Amino acid sequence: MRPSEQLLNIPPPVVGVAIGWRTWLVIAASTVLGLFAIGWPLIIPAVGVAPQHADDAPFVFAALLPVILLLVIAQVTEGGLDARSLAVLGVLSAINAAIRPALGAGTAGIESVFFLLILAGRAFGPGFGYLMGFTSLFASGLLTAGVGPWLPFQMLCAGWVGLAAGLLPKRVKGKAEMAMLIALGIIAAYAFGALMNMWFWPFIAGIDVDGTGSSLDYVPGAPILENLQRFGWFTLITSTASWDTGRAITTTIALLIVGRPVLTVLRRASGMARVHAGDSVT
């Protein structure tokens, strides 16, 4: 804090719940494992595997539960999360889960889950945003009867959106800040769609084992770049111009209409919880 701010009793900028190396270690490990869980068919030929991760999805989900617990424990022991922060996490996750089915739950690309997740990650920091992605999508799955093999992968992808929002530059303010959050919302909409397509593409688009399939099919054992090219065309044709664009438009409109007032409220809540003036603690 500058001397002038001390004299005027101006609090330092709120940067969210501080996180330390233990939390970063859990986030990094779960991110690597999550990316492998989604994209392993690019590395290991997926032949004779149950469709849509029907066999391995329960194990991914079972692995996420201790990850959430470890994240909470790590942030509590590091002094980042306290009782108020945990209460806010529960409330925001419940709100996010409740408004999602009310506004479409992703139907026709109408997706309401990202705007509040992005704002919460911005106000409370990357660790909080990562946790909220897990908890809000899990609660939403329960409310919408959307519990299936796709749920753990949705939770992972949502966690990454909240994490990204918390990692954005803290010094950007005003209209530039909202433009930055909208840009993140658009990128997240398309990235979420691509990652969720990768979740099922090798098992649904068709497995081309004899060279007679289409250019959209997954080829077991083919070079990664070749399969990524096929996947890119599959995503572009099946979801980019429809579901993903609808998700991007919905998120943009929500941030434009209610982004600034909601962010202000969340920052006030962040100020009442235990926050620190640094991005991390040791």
Image (tube, grey):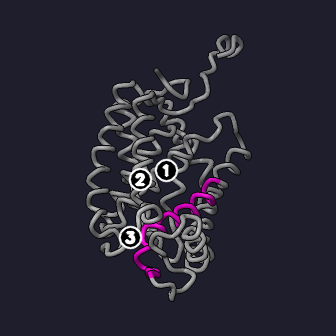
N-terminal of the two: label 2 or label 1?
2
Of badges 3 and 2, nearer the viewer stands 3
Q: Is residue 256 above or below residue 231?
A: above
Residue denoted by label 1: 160
Q: Is residue 193 above or below residue 271?
A: below
Tell whether position 187 is magenta: yes
The residue lying at 56 percent from left, 61 percent from top is 191
Circle 3/circle 2 CB separation < 8 Å: no
Q: Secondary structure at mark 2?
A: helix
Q: Which residues are magenta?
A: 184-209
Residue denoted by label 3: 46
Q: Spot the residue most to the bottom.
A: 212
Amino acid found under the numbered disc labelled 1 = Trp
Amino acid found under the numbered disc labelled 2 = Gly
Foreground residue among 256 and 23:
23
Amino acid found under the numbered disc labelled 3 = Ala
